[in-house]
Amino acid sequence: MPGDPSFTFSVLHRICKLVVLLCFLHIAVAVVFYVRSFDFRLAFVQNQQSNNNISKSQNTDPVVSYGKVLEQPVKKLEKCPETSPLLVGPLKVEFNFTVDLELVKKENPNVQPGGRFKPKDCEALQKVAIIIAFRYREEHLKYWLYYLHPILQRQQLDYGVYVIKQDGNDTFNKCRLLNTGYAEALKEYDYNCFVFNDVDVIPMDDRNTYKCFSQPRHLGVYLDKFGFRLPYNGCFGGATSLSKEQYLKINGFPNNYWGWGGEDDDIYNRVVTKGMSISRPDSEIGKCRMIRHNRDKLNDPNPQRFDLLAHTQQTMDKDGINSLKTQVLSIQKFDLYTMITVDVGKP
Ligand code: UDH
Ligand code: MN
């Protein structure tokens, strides 16, 4: 009964039991929560690790995930087809407008610095270095870049454009420039085909593919300036292509033609002397335009050309890429081409 000490004790006893019970309950709840949060943390760490593996696998190696090997993400490209499906055929080529190279750059966003390109959906059949001998022809170069970059991309070539500029104001030597272009391009990339293109010659059909063939190829063959006809059978100028093997077989080009004329006929002599012949596209596909121009200063007709031409067979093995002595002064990477400035020496 109330007031009885044994009653007071029993009440206190019950309160104590309740407190102890509450304490246990509290501890139990705390333990449950602790264990559950531990589970979460473990899961979080595991998840992080597998995420890391996935992002690693995207960059490099295959990884084992949930017991399966994920597929290697770097896929090998198939070879491009023999004939590009992107070709359009005959082209309108005219020179009655001003070319803005900034615009040309914007219209060819896939051309890489230095004028490099390779198709992204297939592996190009050939690696082509295009070599242009150059001095005082800025306007012609702009047209060339404007017309040729889209054509070469449609032809699905792995290509680079090299403009080889003669330094100074001595007589022009086209072949020393072209030989230097060959050597410098090879230092940069494993090219297996070389196109030698006058800066003012533009093909009028993109089926005229800028690649190499089983024989040296005359690409810039039927010029408007000659009524779209071959002026003579042994003509081999304007734009030509030679594989690395064909070029080395003829020991490259002659170094001793100063001024205008004869060097292309010397190259023709070299080709036939080594038992090769000239391959040409048909008269429709091989049409080209040459930008009208006056004879350049410091490139007068070379009076020695007939003498030199009479001795190609005797001189070709010691005069060529194996005897080239020029000095590269600078290599500049522009958006649409690489310019290499060269001291070719004096006559
Ligand atoms: N070149 C220059 N600057 C010069 C001189 C020549 O850049 O001062 C380069 C340029 O790439 C030019 C090429 O050398 O396109 C040939 O010179 P050219 O244009 O004066 O030659 P041409 O127009 O050639 O006379 C026509 C070729 C037709 C074949 C002839 C058959 N033998
Ligand atoms: Mn010309």
Image (tube, rainbow, N blue to C red):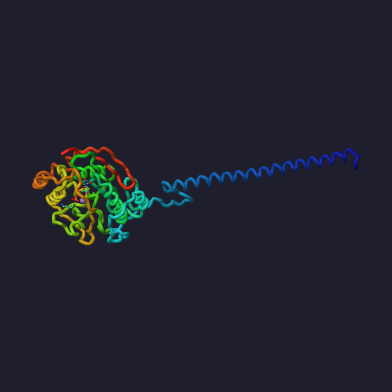
Residue 188, given in percent of the width and then of the height, sits at 28, 43
Quick one: quadrant of the N terminus?
Answer: top right
Q: Is residue 280 above or below residue 336?
A: below
The quadrant in which residue 341 appears is top left
The answer to whether residue 26 of the structure is visible from this angle is yes
Q: Nearer the viewer, residue 323 or 200?
A: 200
Residue 227, given in percent of the width and then of the height, sits at 18, 59
Q: Nearer the viewer, residue 25 or 140?
A: 140
Q: Nearer the viewer, residue 73 or 88?
A: 88
Quick one: quadrant of the C terminus?
Answer: top left
Q: How many marks?
A: 0
Identify which residue is drawn at 56% across, 44% down: 42
- Residue 112 vs residue 30: left or right? left
Q: Nearer the viewer, residue 39 or 117?
A: 117
Residue 187, given in percent of the width and then of the height, sits at 27, 42
The answer to whether residue 79 of the structure is visible from this angle is no
Identify which residue is drawn at 75% across, 40% down: 20
Residue 13, given in percent of the width and then of the height, sits at 82, 40
The quadrant in which residue 346 appears is top left
Identify which residue is drawn at 50% across, 45% down: 49
